[in-house]
């Protein structure tokens, strides 16, 4: 497994990089973000990678962050989506907006991605939404190391759903508060009030 490559950027073109490291030149198909972050040729650059092996090829895919690479891994786990399509999907609207579209079931945003039709968009939502919610919003095992914030989020979401809001709307409101008012997100009453104001 090649986790990342750190070396001199030899060549850069949309969306392909060549990086020389320890005398070896690696050609990497990369996301929009990894391409945008890349410096001028001759400068050092580190790119996170995933090696995909097929019968007729060994292809390196490059990412700007481990979060972007993880999302790529999740996208290509969906039936019918190969690595090149997966790279396009991750590149098209960015990690944050793609996760948001998947978590909220936003078919319009997903269908706006080149190569993604209605059926593919629906498959992405069905196969990834619950996984993203489980992995990133409310952990199954809430530990003391998170300072109690996961427990606060969990209780706030439960309260919003009891008031009649959907899970997706509740999560969106809570994430908005966490992004724009981190202090309010630390206490249940202030998080709830801020979330309700966002509706």
Image (cartoon, helix red, strand yellow):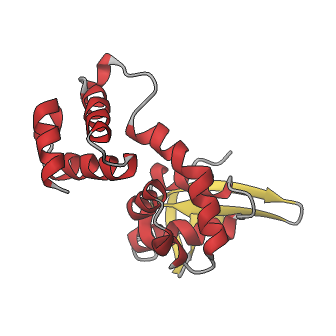
Indicate whether 179 appears above or below 84.
above
**Visible residue check, residue 198:** yes
User: As drawn, is 146 to the left or to the right of 135?
Assistant: left
**Residue, x 30% and y 36% (percent of image)?**
162
Q: Quadrant of residue 122?
A: bottom right
Q: Residue 80: x and y, percent?
A: 75, 63
**Residue, x 47% and y 75% (percent of image)?**
108
Furthest residue toward right: 55
- Quadrant where the N terminus sits is top right
- Quadrant where the C terminus sits is bottom left
Q: Residue 98: x and y, percent?
A: 45, 63
Q: Residue 105: x and y, percent?
A: 48, 60
**Of 43 and 144, the residue lying toward us:** 144
Q: Residue 149: x and y, percent?
A: 25, 30
User: As drawn, is 2 to the left or to the right of 15?
Assistant: right
Q: Quadrant of residue 16?
A: bottom right
The total of numbered circles placed on residues is 0
**Visible residue check, residue 28:** no
Indicate whether 182 appears above or below 124.
above
Furthest residue toward top: 144
**Of 125 and 60, the residue lying toward us:** 125
Indicate whether 41 appears above or below 186.
below
Indicate whether 174 appears above or below 28.
above
């Amino acid at each position: 497994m090649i986790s990342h490559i750190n070396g001199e950027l030899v060549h850069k073109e949309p969306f392909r990089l060549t990086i020389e490291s320890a005398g070896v030149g690696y050609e990497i198909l990369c996301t929009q973000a990894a391409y945008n972050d890349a410096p001028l040729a001759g400068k050092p650059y580190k790119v996170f990678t995933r090696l995909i092996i097929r019968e007729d090829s060994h292809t390196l895919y490059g990412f700007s962050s481990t979060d972007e690479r993880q999302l790529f891994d999740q996208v290509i786990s969906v039936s019918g989506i190969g690595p090149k399509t997966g790279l396009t999907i991750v590149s098209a609207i960015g990690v944050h907006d793609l996760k948001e579209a998947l978590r909220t079931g936003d078919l319009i945003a997903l269908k706006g991605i080149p190569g993604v039709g209605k059926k593919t968009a629906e498959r992405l939502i069905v196969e990834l939404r619950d996984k993203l919610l489980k992995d990133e919003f409310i952990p199954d095992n809430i530990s003391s190391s998170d300072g109690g914030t996961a427990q606060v989020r969990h209780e706030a979401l439960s309260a919003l759903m009891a008031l009649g809001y959907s899970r997706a709307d509740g999560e969106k409101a809570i994430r908005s508060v966490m992004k724009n008012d981190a202090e309010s997100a630390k206490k249940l009453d202030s998080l709830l009030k801020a979330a309700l104001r966002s509706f």
